[in-house]
C-alpha cells in the first residue's frame, strides 16, 4: 500500500498557496527610474517604459497604479478621522475586486463537504486502535504551528517577494494596501475572506478525501494533521480578520484567550511601519523565532535577484544599508511604485540624506518626463481631432495635480511641474 506522507502534503500546500510565483516574478515590477551611469546627474537617470507612449485613451488600463491607486491615496491622505477611515475602506475595495460570490460559495461548500468525508474516513481508520485517538489529538498542536508558519510564509511572499504585476498582482497590492487600512478586511464577508483560499485548496481536500477510494492508506495521524492543516489554512484570513477587531466574536475571543488564535496586540506589531516582522496569521506562535529569519531571507533574495522588495517599496525607511549603498551607486533600478509611495507618504522617505535626495530628484524628474510625454501624445492626437485632444489633456491635468501641478497648461505650451 502507498502511504501519503506529511512532506508530500506540505509540498502540495505550498504550491497551492503560492500559485503563480514564477509568472509573477517573471513579469516583475515596472521600474521607471534606472541609474545607468554614475557620472550622470540623477535627473538624467530616467528610463521611461513604453507604457506611457500608448494612446491617451488606454492610460486607465495600462497605468492603474499611476492613475487610480496613487491618485486615490493622495486624495485619502488629505482626510482625517472617521472620514479618512471610510475612504480607505472604499479604496481597498477598488484595489482588489471581490470576485464571483457564487464561485466562492461553491468552493467553500465543496471543501467542507470533503472535510466531512475525510473525517469519516479517519474515524473508520482509527476504530479498533485504542492509541489512535490520543495520537491524533497529539498531532494537532504541531499541525497548528505548521499552519501558522505556512501562513507567515504566504503573507511574507505577498508582502515582500511577489510582484505587483502578473497573476498575483491584485493580491500583492491588496496586501500592501491592507497595511494602510488594517481594519478594512474586518468588513469583508466570510466568503470574501475565504473564497480564494478555498479555491486553491480544493484539489488538496479532494486528494486526501479520495485516497482511500484509490487504495492508498492514509495514516490516521497524517490524515488528522492534513485535515486540521487544510481547514486552518482555508480560514487563515478569518483568524487574521479577528485579530483586527477590538471585540472579536465570542468563539475567537475564547481561542485568543487560549492562545490558539492571533490576538490584536500580537498582530499590531506587523502593522507598524516598516511592515517587516510578525507575518504569521493563525496564532502567532512562530512569529518570535522568525523575526531574525525574515531579514536574513530578504538579504539572500536581494543578493540573488537585485529586486527591491515590497516592504522597502511601501516604506523606504526600511531599506537595508547594503541595498541603499547599491542604489546610491546607481547600480540598480528604483521601481515606480516606490516613487509613488513617497509621493503619498512623505514621512516614509529614508533618513539617509543622499538616498532621500536621490529619490526626490528621481520622482520630480519622472513627473516632468511623464508630463511631457503625455503632452506629446495629445499633440499627436490633435492632428486627427484637436477638440478631443484639448479636452482629454485638460481633464488629465485636472484629475492628476500631483503629477501636472495645480496650473492648467494649454496643449500648445510647454510643461512645468510644480
Image (cartoon, rainbow, N blue to C red):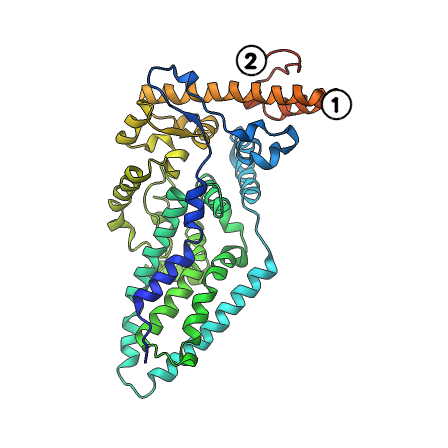
Q: Quadrant of residue 318?
A: top left
Identity of the residue furthest to the top in this view: 413
In the displayed structure, 192 sits above or below 67; it is: below
Say which of 17 and 22 sits in front.
22
Visible residue check, residue 294: yes
SS at mark 2?
loop
SS at mark 1?
loop
Say which of 344 and 294 sits in front.
294
In percent of the image, x 37 and y 15: which residue is there?
40
First-in-chain label (1 vs 2): 1
In percent of the image, x 34 and y 56: which residue is there?
150
Question: Which numbered disc covers residue 385?
Answer: 1
Say which of 368 and 179 sits in front.
368
Question: Which numbered disc covers residue 302?
Answer: none
Q: Position of residue 238 (x, y in %)?
A: 45, 57
In the displayed structure, 102 sits above or below 393; it is: below
Say which of 391 and 91 sits in front.
391
In percent of the image, x 44 and y 60: which residue is there?
235
Quarter of the picture holding the N terminus: bottom left
Q: Position of residue 27 (x, y in %)?
A: 46, 41
The reply to whether discs 1 and 2 touch (Cβ–Cβ < 8 Å) is no
In the displayed structure, 62 sits above or below 175; it is: above
Visible residue check, residue 351: no
Q: Quadrant of residue 105?
A: bottom right
Q: Position of residue 258 (x, y in %)?
A: 33, 61
Question: Which numbered disc covers residue 416?
Answer: 2
Q: Position of residue 206 (x, y in %)?
A: 46, 70
Amino acid at each position: 500500500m502507498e502511504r501519503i506522507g506529511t512532506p508530500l502534503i506540505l509540498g502540495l500546500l505550498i504550491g497551492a498557496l503560492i500559485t503563480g510565483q514564477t509568472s509573477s516574478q517573471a513579469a516583475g515590477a515596472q521600474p521607471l527610474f534606472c541609474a545607468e551611469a554614475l557620472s550622470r546627474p540623477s535627473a538624467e537617470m530616467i528610463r521611461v517604459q513604453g507604457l506611457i507612449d500608448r494612446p491617451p485613451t488606454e492610460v486607465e488600463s495600462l497605468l492603474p497604479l499611476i492613475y487610480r491607486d496613487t491618485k486615490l491615496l493622495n486624495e485619502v491622505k488629505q482626510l482625517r478621522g472617521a472620514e479618512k477611515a471610510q475612504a480607505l475602506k472604499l479604496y481597498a475595495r477598488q484595489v482588489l475586486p471581490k470576485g464571483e460570490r457564487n464561485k466562492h460559495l461553491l468552493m467553500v461548500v465543496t471543501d467542507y463537504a470533503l472535510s466531512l468525508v475525510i473525517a469519516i474516513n479517519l474515524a473508520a481508520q482509527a476504530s479498533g486502535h485504542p492509541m489512535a485517538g490520543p495520537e491524533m489529538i497529539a498531532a494537532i498542536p504541531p499541525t497548528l504551528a505548521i499552519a501558522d508558519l505556512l501562513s507567515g510564509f504566504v503573507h511574507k511572499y505577498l508582502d515582500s517577494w511577489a510582484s505587483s504585476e502578473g497573476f498575483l498582482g491584485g493580491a500583492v497590492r491588496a496586501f500592501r494596501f491592507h497595511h494602510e487600512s488594517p481594519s478594512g478586511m474586518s468588513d469583508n464577508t466570510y466568503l470574501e475572506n475565504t473564497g480564494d483560499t478555498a479555491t486553491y485548496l480544493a484539489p488538496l481536500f479532494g486528494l486526501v478525501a479520495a485516497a482511500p477510494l484509490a487504495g492508498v492508506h492514509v495514516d490516521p495521524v497524517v490524515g488528522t494533521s492534513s485535515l486540521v492543516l487544510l481547514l486552518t489554512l482555508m480560514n487563515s484570513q478569518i483568524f487574521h480578520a479577528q485579530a483586527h477587531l477590538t471585540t472579536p466574536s465570542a468563539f475567537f475571543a475564547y481561542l485568543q484567550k487560549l492562545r490558539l488564535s492571533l490576538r490584536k496586540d500580537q498582530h499590531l506589531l506587523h502593522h507598524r511601519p516598516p511592515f517587516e516582522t510578525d507575518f504569521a496569521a493563525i496564532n502567532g506562535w512562530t512569529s518570535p523565532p522568525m523575526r531574525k529569519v525574515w531579514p536574513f531571507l530578504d538579504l539572500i533574495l536581494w543578493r540573488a535577484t537585485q529586486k527591491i522588495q515590497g516592504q522597502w517599496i511601501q516604506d523606504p525607511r526600511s531599506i537595508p544599508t547594503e541595498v541603499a549603498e547599491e542604489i546610491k551607486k546607481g547600480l540598480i533600478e528604483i521601481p515606480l511604485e516606490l516613487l509613488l509611495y513617497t509621493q503619498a507618504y512623505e514621512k516614509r522617505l529614508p533618513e539617509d540624506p543622499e538616498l532621500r535626495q536621490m529619490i526626490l530628484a528621481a520622482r520630480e524628474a519622472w513627473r516632468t518626463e511623464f508630463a511631457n510625454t503625455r503632452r506629446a501624445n495629445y499633440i499627436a492626437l490633435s492632428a486627427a481631432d484637436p477638440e478631443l485632444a484639448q479636452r482629454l489633456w485638460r481633464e488629465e491635468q485636472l484629475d492628476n495635480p500631483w503629477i501636472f501641478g495645480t496650473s492648467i497648461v494649454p496643449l500648445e505650451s510647454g510643461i512645468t511641474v510644480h
